[in-house]
């Protein structure tokens, strides 16, 4: 019942984010389109991965043996890769917004954002296919296959987690340094704009922080797994996996906590006002 509740909350929360961005016209900008892509990945986690994981948790599915376990693993890694690459794109968006505000709208136009989203989902799908194919090869050899170890426990985590996280942290460090420099020399006429950009950066940095808390233990564990000689119980892996899935539930609450206009949009949608009138041009405050 608890896991089912997590799934429902994840689906409902991310649907609210998606509907809010799509419904209100003034929310249609590059940053929110990237947030929309992130919410779509989280929604798929709630719709697909949560039910599969609940079935496997209740049936004590054995890792690295069953076909559906391989499918589950590939979906997990694919959607986690999609989330982290979306966060990587968001960090790039924030970099241009804070560090190069005069060229921001030219550099991060709609075409560029759409291309970034397409690359994100394409790379995620390729990694999922690679992990699935590598997992299926396990039935043709004894114990751990070299190709499976490389894909699931070495190359996969490096490409889908460690490398993007390093890139994101470097970008946010650069943003922090520039923001601090601007804070010392900013003119009064730019204070409002600067405050807005800092708010967006702070919010998206919080999303990144929660992501790292939820995902780092799992990726460290599966990287260590081939060298553990079976010392890591399946229950520990299962618990860490559910910690990663909970990240998809937390992101909408972060947006609602930091953004007043997200909260206002949520209230309009939840109250059903969108069915009683046209609020698409409403300015959310």
Image (spheres, rainbow, N blue to C red):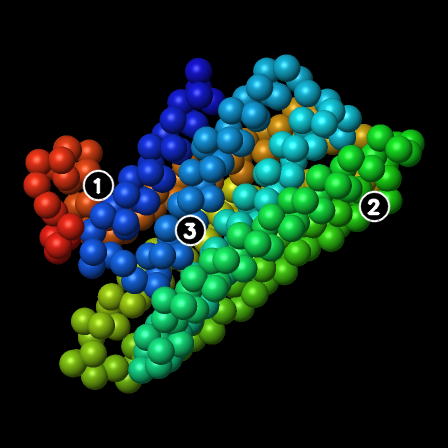
Q: Residue at x 91, y 34 (%)?
A: 141
Mark 3–mark 2 distance (CA, rounded to whole Å): 31 Å
Q: Which mark is residue 180?
A: none
Q: Is residue 57 above or below residue 168?
A: above
Q: Is residue 208 above or below residue 16?
A: below
Say what secondary structure mark 3 lies in.
helix
Say what secondary structure mark 1 lies in.
helix
Q: Residues within 10 Å of mark 2 (few under 14, many from 20)?
A: some
Percent coordinates x, y for residue 269 in the rendering: 19, 38
Q: Is residue 45 above or below residue 280?
A: above
Q: Residues within 10 Å of mark 3 (few under 14, many from 20)?
A: many
Say what secondary structure mark 2 lies in.
helix
Q: Residue at x 20, y 59 (%)?
A: 26
Q: Which mark is residue 266?
A: 1
Residue underneath mark 2: 147
Q: Which of pointers 3 and 2 lies earlier in the amino acid sequence? A: 3
Q: Quadrant of the N terminus?
A: top left
Percent coordinates x, y for residue 127 in the rendering: 66, 49
Residue 132 lies in quadrant: top right
Q: Which of pointers 3 and 1 lies earlier in the amino acid sequence? A: 3
Q: How many numbered discs sit on the rendered protein?
A: 3
Mark 1–mark 2 distance (CA, rounded to whole Å): 46 Å
Q: Which mark is residue 37?
A: 3
Mark 3–mark 1 distance (CA, rounded to whole Å): 18 Å
């Amino acid at each position: 019942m608890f896991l089912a509740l997590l799934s429902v909350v994840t689906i409902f929360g991310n649907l609210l984010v998606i509907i809010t961005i799509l419904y209100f016209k003034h929310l249609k900008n590059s940053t929110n389109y990237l947030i929309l892509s992130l919410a779509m990945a989280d929604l798929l986690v709630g719709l697909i991965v949560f039910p599969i994981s609940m079935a496997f948790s209740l049936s004590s599915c054995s890792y690295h043996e069953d076909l559906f376990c391989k499918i589950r693993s590939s979906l997990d890694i694919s959607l986690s890769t999609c989330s982290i690459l979306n966060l990587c794109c968001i960090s790039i968006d924030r970099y241009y917004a804070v560090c190069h505000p005069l060229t921001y709208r030219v550099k991060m136009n709609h075409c560029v954002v759409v291309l970034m989203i397409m690359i994100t989902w394409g790379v995620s799908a390729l990694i999922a296919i690679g992990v699935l194919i590598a997992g299926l090869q396990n039935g043709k050899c004894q114990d751990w296959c070299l190709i499976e170890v490389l894909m699931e426990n070495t190359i996969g985590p490096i490409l889908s987690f460690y490398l993007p996280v390093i890139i994101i942290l470097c970008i946010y460090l650069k943003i922090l340094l520039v923001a601090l420099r601007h804070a010392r020399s900013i003119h009064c006429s730019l204070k409002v704009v600067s405050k807005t950009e800092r708010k967006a950066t702070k919010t998206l940095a919080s999303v990144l922080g929660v992501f790292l808390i939820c995902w780092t233990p799992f990726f460290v564990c599966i990287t260590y797994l081939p060298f553990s000689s079976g010392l890591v119980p399946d229950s520990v892996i299962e618990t860490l996996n559910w910690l990663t899935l909970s990240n998809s539930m937390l992101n909408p609450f972060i947006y609602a906590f930091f953004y007043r206009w997200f909260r206002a949009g949520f209230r309009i949608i939840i109250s059903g006002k969108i069915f009683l009138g046209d609020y698409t041009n409403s300015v959310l405050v």
